[in-house]
Image: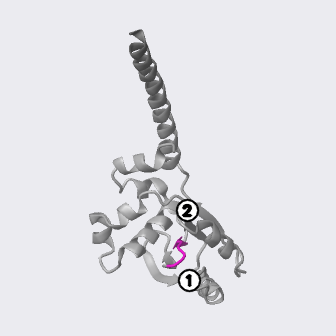
Amino acid sequence: MLEPAISNETLQDAKAKADSKAIDVFAGNLSQLLLAPPLGEKRILAIDPGFRSGCKIVCLDEKGDLLYNETIYPHQPQNESAMAMKKIRSMVNAYNIEAISIGNGTASRETEFFIKKIAFDKPVQVFIVSEAGASVYSASKIAREEFSKYDVTVRGSVSIGRRLADPLAELVKIDPKIYWRWTIPT
């Protein structure tokens, strides 16, 4: 007769401890995400990597304004890496790019490896940034108003670039409830 009561009490205690630990991890992850140091006012080439749909690229000025956008296909199945290298090198030179921001989603490591193979004329820093919430921002009213002429893929790439320049300024554009999805432990 006591077994169900003791079992329920033990499970409740374990759940309370697990919930407390999950909240601690969530708080730590969110703090790390929101307090990431800004790169500052630099010209950034931002890449939203992908395999089949290609890598969406935007060039941003020092204020985060969109200068240029294009899609390249350096990975399988298209595998147009030579052409993609030429285009990126040309964009870096034409827009005086100082840093490259790569989203941490699908194909991010492959894209980082591809970018690091390019021989630039000057030193260019390469960073991997969190894409958490970029798709939410790109479909938001704020993004549609700011970039009414562009589709969601371009807006998402802009968000990836701006997250490098000033993460907090970009992340405050997204509803805080969205962060829960990307910061809870799995």
Q: Is residue 28 left or right of residue 80?
A: left
- 44 or 181, which is in the foreground? 181
Q: Is residue 16 left or right of residue 146?
A: right
Q: Are marks 1 and 2 in contact (CB under 8 Å)?
A: no
Q: Position of residue 63 (x, y in %)?
A: 45, 68
Residue closest to the far top: 2
Taking the image as drawn, is residue 20 in sight? yes
Give the vertical position of 167 relative to 138 (above or below). above
Q: Earlier in the sequence, mark 1 or mark 2?
A: 1
Residue 47 in magenta? yes
- 20 or 66, which is in the foreground? 20
Q: Determine the residue positioned at 29% across, 76% down.
A: 148
Q: Magenta span covers which residues?
A: 45-52
Give the vertical position of 110 relative to 77 (above or below). above
Q: Is residue 35 left or right of residue 88?
A: left
Taking the image as drawn, is residue 176 in sight? no
Q: Position of residue 40 (x, y in %)?
A: 54, 61
Q: Label 2 amino acid?
A: Asn
| The disc label shown at residue 104, or none | 2
**Secondary structure under the numbered disc 2 in the rendered image:** loop
**Secondary structure under the numbered disc 1 in the rendered image:** loop
Give the labeled residue for mark 1.
73
Q: Determine the residue positioned at 44% across, 18% down.
A: 7
Q: Determine the residue positioned at 47% across, 40% down.
A: 26
